[in-house]
Amino acid sequence: MLRLSTKGQYGVRAMFEIARGQGNKPVPIKEIAERQAVSVAYLEQILNKLKNGGLIRSIKGPGGGYVLINKPEDVSISAILNELEGPVAITSCLDPEEGCVRVDGCVTYMLWKSLGEKIDAFLRTVTLKDLIAGTLFKKNLKLKVKSQK
Amino acid sequence: MLRLSTKGQYGVRAMFEIARGQGNKPVPIKEIAERQAVSVAYLEQILNKLKNGGLIRSIKGPGGGYVLINKPEDVSISAILNELEGPVAITSCLDPEEGCVRVDGCVTYMLWKSLGEKIDAFLRTVTLKDLIAGTLFKKNLKLKVKSQK
DNA sequence: AAAATACCTTACTAATATTGTCAAGTATTC
DNA sequence: GAATACTTGACAATATTAGTAAGGTATTTT
């Protein structure tokens, strides 16, 4: 359950590829597509969204490609996924574009809301730099959920 | 993103209804269906899974209905969702029934794995009793993610 | 200037998953 | 034995996902 779409997954990986090329040359879409074994056409849709969201910019012409707008340490996974799939919304109640329909006293409303917030809080703490450095594993060990029932 | 299916949502609410009737009489499916404005036929599918999963049992005949097998404080949301939708698996890589196909060094593997674990850890801390008591909100305030970068 | 490279946009389609409905049972109690 | 209630399996409508296809436009290098 709670599967992330391939768009989100590929998007994060594409951003990773672009971030890795940071400082050197722009990363052409073809290169990203090859490394991820995804079609250029599909990637174009994804990168387009990220571009409109102000996360990357494109450089045309030979030698061109995509470049990050911000530094890798300033790009969170949350920001990437938000652009590609909108905010975390476990239920339609919590989707800003929909809203609560059901009558009952919304017993579960707080449950799904809390879960969504927890997820986003986590995704905000992880950045592209973490992916590049491969520090995620270590870092995660230090992130603990403290229950004080 | 990360939407939970209605099956999972209705399932949790159905379990809530059954838990609320605990100690009194078995809760007939018709009653649950009415309170949630869901068809009996659809609910049957859901309750059937929960029954096979050992979370509830059914009592036939007039006056019959569904009853929890364990106490509300021993039934976590995680257990319910696991039965209805399988374990949290953000990507197919992490689905026990599938597995990793992609070639690349799995840069994001730990990311999705960590997220999945975080989600499940949270869902394990919330039980039907919490929903009944309405303590979720307060409790959640005390659950903090401690980042020690 | 023209060719090569690379991005840009829109439309469309196939596959899959979700969200249910429907029908015909079986079991139990009053 | 009639009413109540659960049980099972097949099926269909809808929505979403995942991806293709085609025909652009913009920029740089030679």
Image: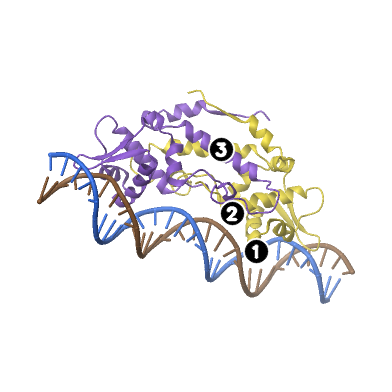
Chain colours: A yellow, B purple, C blue, D brown
Residue B117 circle label: 3
Q: Is residue A20 left or right of residue B110?
A: right
Q: Name which residue lies at 48% across and 33% down.
A: B124
Vertically, is B114 above or below A7?
above
From what the image shows, is residue A78 above or below residue A148? below
Residue extending furthest top? A148
Tag shown at residue B35: none
Please name the residue shown 64% across and 52% down the image. Answer: A11
Residue at horizontal 46 percent and vertical 37 percent from the top: B78
Q: Position of residue B143 (x, y in %)?
A: 52, 28
Rounded to the nearest angstrom, the CA distance separating label 1 from label 3 is 33 Å
Which of label 2 and label 3 is nearer to you?
A: 3
Residue B76 position in % (x across, y down): 43, 34
Asked which secondary structure carries label 1, the reply is helix
Numbered mark located on residue A41 in the image: 1
- The residue wearing badge 2 is A6
**Mark 2 to mark 3: distance in Å?**
20 Å
> Does residue D7 appear left or right of residue A116 in this picture?
left
